[in-house]
Image (cartoon, helix red, strand yellow):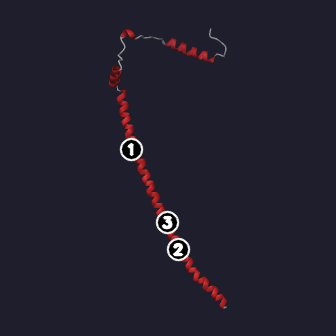
């Protein structure tokens, strides 16, 4: 019976030590996980701030380019650029106006459909 008491007392001695070790590992692991999670939250917040700053910069650039485009498209600016290149408005004698009736346009439209529908090798008459 003395032999059983020896074995029993050894199990009693290591039981609380194992429980304490497991508890320490659990608390330590939780602490490490908490610190890692806080670090990730900080890094993601930093990335969000950088992306928002970049978005604001792109919005300012876009607005500036829209203003520049509107300025370049303005008739006054276009006229100034044309004059600086030596271009002048066309004289009335230089303008040739062509008039085409609606029926002629419709005939040409039907003709192009007919040409497209012809089989290969057949020439128009």
Q: In the rendered image, which residue does mark 1 sit on?
A: 56
Q: In the rendered view, would you say 13 is above or below 36?
A: below
Task: Tell me if label 1 and label 3 are in contact, CB under 8 Å.
Answer: no
Judged from the image, the secondary structure of the residue bearing numbered disc 3 is helix
Residue nearest the viewer, comparing 98 with 86: 86
Q: Secondary structure at mark 2?
A: helix
The Cα atoms of the two marked residues, 2 and 1, are separated by 49 Å
Q: Which residue is mark 3?
A: 32
| Disc 1 crowd, CA 10 A, few/some/many (<14, 14-19, 20+) | few
Q: Position of residue 96 (x, y in %)?
A: 42, 10
Give coordinates of residue 48: x percent, y percent: 43, 51
Q: Residues within 10 Å of mark 2 (few under 14, many from 20)?
A: few
Residue 74 drawn above or below residue 107: below
Numbered label attached to residue 23: 2
Query: Of circles 1 and 3, which is in front?
Result: 3
**Vertical order, 85 against 63 (above or below):** above
Residue drawn at the location 50% of the way across and 64% of the way down: 33
Q: Earlier in the sequence, mark 2 or mark 1?
A: 2
The image quarter containing residue 110 is top right
The earlier-in-sequence mark between 3 and 2 is 2
Q: Secondary structure at mark 1?
A: helix
Percent across and percent down for residue 65 are: 38, 35
Classify 86 as above or below 25: above
């Amino acid at each position: 019976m003395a032999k059983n008491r020896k074995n029993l007392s050894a199990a009693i001695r290591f039981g609380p030590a194992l429980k304490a070790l497991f508890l320490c590992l659990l608390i330590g692991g939780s602490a490490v996980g908490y610190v890692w999670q806080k670090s990730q939250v900080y890094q993601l917040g930093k990335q969000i701030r950088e992306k928002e700053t970049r978005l604001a910069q792109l919005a300012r650039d876009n607005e500036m380019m829209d203003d520049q485009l509107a300025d370049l498209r303005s008739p006054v600016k276009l006229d100034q650029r044309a004059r600086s290149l030596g271009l002048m408005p066309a004289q009335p004698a230089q303008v040739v106006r062509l008039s085409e009736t609606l029926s002629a346009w419709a005939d040409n439209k039907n003709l192009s459909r007919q040409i497209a529908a012809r089989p290969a090798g057949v020439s128009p008459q």
